[in-house]
């Protein structure tokens, strides 16, 4: 099957509560039985699931007389909820689920892909990559697998999935041990053994970690505890591998020591001297939420085998979380770039963007060029920079780029290095980068972020008010962050008070300001960067309601023809001021709700009267005062 449209994209989750999201919005799957049908069809992986098997999974040994009709009802419900791109086909003697080639994410498949890559990296002697990729695999899990399904399916499949998780976890712990993180993993291993006392692999890893931490006596005691547990529970001696490890502990055998880490080997191979490699990445947000698919796509793009440098852009409207996403991805791939990680603020959205020559001067100094020996002209600095990074594995995070002209001189020209660029501009003229246009968060992720910031107890106590706050923030991470921090800073305020303030259009943006966090300031900065005609188009767009705007309607308000109006609207979309959506058989342009409030305020200040589009065909267009345009949501 072909790919699905972006607004119909599906995420189907099995590794935790059974969930489905279409276009970023949760799908109400109903009770346990339709969830069981969906999970069974997904686990079958394009295999026909017979009616008899579905009956057993739904009702065990006591099916009702109407079980066939009920199965048909549940299958039809799944088909209807997941949309036309997904086929739930009646294929006797049962049902078959067919998925499109693209546009559907299944967390179990994502987990298995990462787990296979991580296991291969561990076998191939690159424990740093293995540890990172295996962590990504385990990060896909959201809780106990197959949550919310009927007991027969859970009893049949849950233990197998949990075994996959534990195997991957043991491999990740092995990678950490190879990287010399023995002291760090000891508490984790102790907790895991308490939960899974019969897993001998975990016992062996604990013995190894204790020995490498200088605790030989504790390592031997861990072996005695393992032997006693196995004898008591199973009447067995430890496996041959655990017994060999015990003998190695007694003799202090060199096999107990970790192999040389990948980073050390890389440094020895290059033989470079001079200052240590730069490690300038700011910390990633500790409360980063959601965006799993985007993070996975970025990390894969930045670590894959490419003939040239890896260049990837993250673009989107102000406050949508571009820098946060870039930093999370950069930290996850940092060990892939042992020659350094650099973060450079290009100040592209402000009044004084960093000139490429100045940016190159900073990069050259970080790479060891003395202050007085930096070349003078832009071309000379470009050549010196490319020579300096040739053969290195360097990661550049170029944050807040003004445009292509500023970025091009800074991009690596040879393989091994990578650049991750964030910008409010689309950067469409760059040659061949990977692209991640970032939109607002899904409703579920937005609520999860607000809950982290405001506190779970506050949200649980006032679920309706919390929903109102999240709704007012319209999926914008900066808005959610301000609202969440304000709620946490004022625990004596009920959330309903904040929700009521945010619900008033004339004060919404004022409420989304706290200390140096201000959505209005971000929007103002970006607004000043637009040319006058684009600013005027944005202002008038805000007067025409919350629905997608068609070019011919904009043309009437702007006093121009449809082609020119569409050029202006398309330019705003490319700069992430609005989004393109299917609308009434064509395409329309829709403002984000908070952008519309900002633009409406600019309209009231900067325009006199606003000619509205014709309310009915051929009726004369009324004119209204800009400040009197009604807020419609």
Image: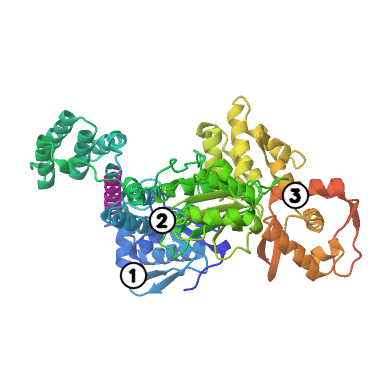
* Place of residue 326 in the rendered image (x, y in percent of width and height, measured from the top left): 53, 49
- Estimate how packed mark 3 is, as few (under 14), some (14 to 19) or many (20 or more) residues with alpha carbons within 10 Å: some
Q: Kindly indicate the quadrant of the structure image that contains residue 173.
A: top left
- Residue at (10% x, 35% y) in the render: 250
Of mark 2 and mark 3, the one earlier in the sequence is 2
SS type, badge 1:
loop
Q: Is residue 241 visible?
A: yes
SS type, badge 2:
helix
Residue 277 or residue 209, whichever sits in front: 277
Position of residue 584 relative to residue 278, above or below, is below
Residue 153 or residue 595, whichever sits in front: 595
- Classify residue 176 as left or right of residue 401: left
Position of residue 177 relative to residue 126, above or below, is above
Q: Which residues are magenta?
A: 160-176
Residue 40 or residue 579, whichever sits in front: 579
Q: Kindly indicate the quadrant of the structure image that contains residue 601.
A: top right
- Estimate how packed mark 1 is, as few (under 14), some (14 to 19) or many (20 or more) residues with alpha carbons within 10 Å: some
Q: Which residue is mark 1?
A: 47
Of circles 3 and 1, which is in front? 3
* Place of residue 530 in the rendered image (x, y in percent of width and height, measured from the top left): 76, 54
Of mark 3 and mark 1, the one earlier in the sequence is 1
Q: Which residue is mark 2?
A: 107
SS type, badge 3:
helix
Question: What secondary structure do most residues of the magenta stretch adopt?
Answer: helix
* Residue 175 magenta: yes
Instruction: Identify the mark at residue 527; answer none if there is no mark.
Output: 3
């Amino acid at each position: 099957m072909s790919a699905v449209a972006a607004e119909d994209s599906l995420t189907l989750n099995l590794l935790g509560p059974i969930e489905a999201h279409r276009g970023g919005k949760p799908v109400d799957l109903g009770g346990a039985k339709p969830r069981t049908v969906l999970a069974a069809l997904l686990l079958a992986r394009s295999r026909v699931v017979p009616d008899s098997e579905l009956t057993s999974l739904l009702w065990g040994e006591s099916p009702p007389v109407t079980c066939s009709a009920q199965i048909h009802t549940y299958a039809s419900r799944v088909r209807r909820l997941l949309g036309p791109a997904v086929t739930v086909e009646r294929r006797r003697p049962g049902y078959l689920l067919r998925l499109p080639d693209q546009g559907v994410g299944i967390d179990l498949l994502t987990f298995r892909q990462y787990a296979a890559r991580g296991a291969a990296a561990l076998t191939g002697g690159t424990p740093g990559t293995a540890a990172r990729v295996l962590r990504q695999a385990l990060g896909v899990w959201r809780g106990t697998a197959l949550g919310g399904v009927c007991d027969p399916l859970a009893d049949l499949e849950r233990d197998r999935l949990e075994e996959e998780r534990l195997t991957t976890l043991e491999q990740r712990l092995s990678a950490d041990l190879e990287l010399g993180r023995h002291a760090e993993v000891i508490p984790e291993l102790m907790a895991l053994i308490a939960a899974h006392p019969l897993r001998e692999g975990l016992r062996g890893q604990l013995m190894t970690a204790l020995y490498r931490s200088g605790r030989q006596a504790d390592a031997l005691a861990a072996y005695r505890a393992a032997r006693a547990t196995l004898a008591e529970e199973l009447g067995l001696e430890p496996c041959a591998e655990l017994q060999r490890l015990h003998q190695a502990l007694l003799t202090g055998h060199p096999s107990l020591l970790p192999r040389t880490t990948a980073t050390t080997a890389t440094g020895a191979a290059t033989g470079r001297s001079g200052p240590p490699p730069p490690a300038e990445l700011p910390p990633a947000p500790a409360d980063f939420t959601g965006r799993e698919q985007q993070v996975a796509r970025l990390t894969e793009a930045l670590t894959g085998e490419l003939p040239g440098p890896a260049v990837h852009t993250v673009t989107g409207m102000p406050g949508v979380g571009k820098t946060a996403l870039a930093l999370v991805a950069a930290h996850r791939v940092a060990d892939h770039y042992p020659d350094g990680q650099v973060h450079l603020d290009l100040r592209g959205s402000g009044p004084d963007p960093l000139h490429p020559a100045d940016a190159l001067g900073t990069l050259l100094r970080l790479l060891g060029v003395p202050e007085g020996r930096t070349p003078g002209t832009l071309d000379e600095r470009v050549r010196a920079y490319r020579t300096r990074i040739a053969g290195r594995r360097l990661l550049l995070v170029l944050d807040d780029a003004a445009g292509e002209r500023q970025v091009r001189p800074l991009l690596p020209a040879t393989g091994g290095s990578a650049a991750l660029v964030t910008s409010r501009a689309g950067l469409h003229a760059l040659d061949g980068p990977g692209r991640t246009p970032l939109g607002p968060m899904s409703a579920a992720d937005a609520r999860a972020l607000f809950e982290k910031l405001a506190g779970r107890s506050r949200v649980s106590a006032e679920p309706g008010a919390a929903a109102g706050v999240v709704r007012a923030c319209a999926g914008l991470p900066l808005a959610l962050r301000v609202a969440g921090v304000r709620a946490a800073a004022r625990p004596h305020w009920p959330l309903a008070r904040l929700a009521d303030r945010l619900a008033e259009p004339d004060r919404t943006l004022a409420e989304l300001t706290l200390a140096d966090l201000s959505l209005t300031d971000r929007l103002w900065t970006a607004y000043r960067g637009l040319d006058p005609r684009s600013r005027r188009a944005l202002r008038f767009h805000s007067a025409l309601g919350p629905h997608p705007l068609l070019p011919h309607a904009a043309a009437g308000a702007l006093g121009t023809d449809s082609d020119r109006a569409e050029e202006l609207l398309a330019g705003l979309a490319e700069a992430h001021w609005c989004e393109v959506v299917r609308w009434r058989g064509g395409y329309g342009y829709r403002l984000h709700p908070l952008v519309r409030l900002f633009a409406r305020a600019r309209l009231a200040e900067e325009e006199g009267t606003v000619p509205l589009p014709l309310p009915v065909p051929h009726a004369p267009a009324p004119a209204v005062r800009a400040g009197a345009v009604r807020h419609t949501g």
